[in-house]
Amino acid sequence: MDPSSPSLPPAASASINGTAPATAATTDPAAAHKTGEDFEAFFLSQVFENMFTGVGTDSLFGGGNAESVYRSLLLQQYSKVAAKAGGVGIADAVQREILRAQEGT
């Protein structure tokens, strides 16, 4: 198949030719911060899941599968709130790296 074929998108054609695909560069700090905050929330949800692995469910409230599902949802919300409130600083570092990578420095 010819890499310069019109049926291939530019990114696919560029990767076949051995060149880096063109990406839409944006230096929007708000978008970079949102991405960093989302990453930090995901990281914190993984940390919280590991923290609560050994904690059993209380039989007073029923326990079972439903409680473990709701615990998971609760921990996801905790992680989003923690990241939005400043978290542990991962979001700021990710934002800096995104902006630095997009500026090409």
Image (tube, grey):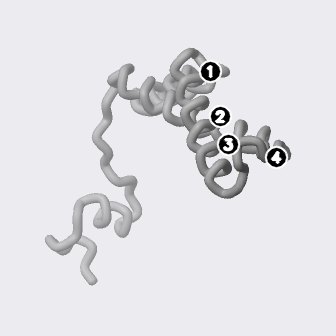
Q: Is residue 53 above or below residue 17?
A: above
Circle 2 residue:
44
Q: Is residue 94 above or below residue 4?
A: above
Please name the residue shown 17% across and 73% down the image: 7
Of all residues shown, which one is farthest toward the left?
Answer: 6
Q: Which residue is mark 3?
A: 46
Residue positioned 76% across, 42% down in the render: 60
Q: Amino acid at mark 3?
A: Gln
Dot placed on the residue nearer the N-terminal end, 4 or 3: 3
Secondary structure type for disc 3? helix
Q: Amino acid at mark 4?
A: Gly
Of callouts 1 and 2, the N-terminal one: 2
- Sequence-earlier tag: 4 or 2: 2
Q: Amino acid at mark 2?
A: Leu
Identify the mark nearer the N-term, 1 or 4: 4
The answer to whether residue 91 is left or right of residue 68 is: left
- Quarter-wise, where is residue 1 in the image? bottom left
Whether tag 4 and tag 3 are in contact, CB under 8 A, the answer is: no
Q: CA distance from mark 4 to mark 3?
A: 18 Å
Q: Where on the picture, by quarter, is residue 71?
A: top right
Position of residue 87 measured from the top left corner of the image (x, y, whole percent): 62, 21
Mark 1 nearby-residue class (10 Å; few <14, some 14–19, many ≥20): some
Q: Tell us which disc is closer to us: 4 or 3.
A: 4
Q: CB under 8 Å between callouts 1 and 2?
A: yes
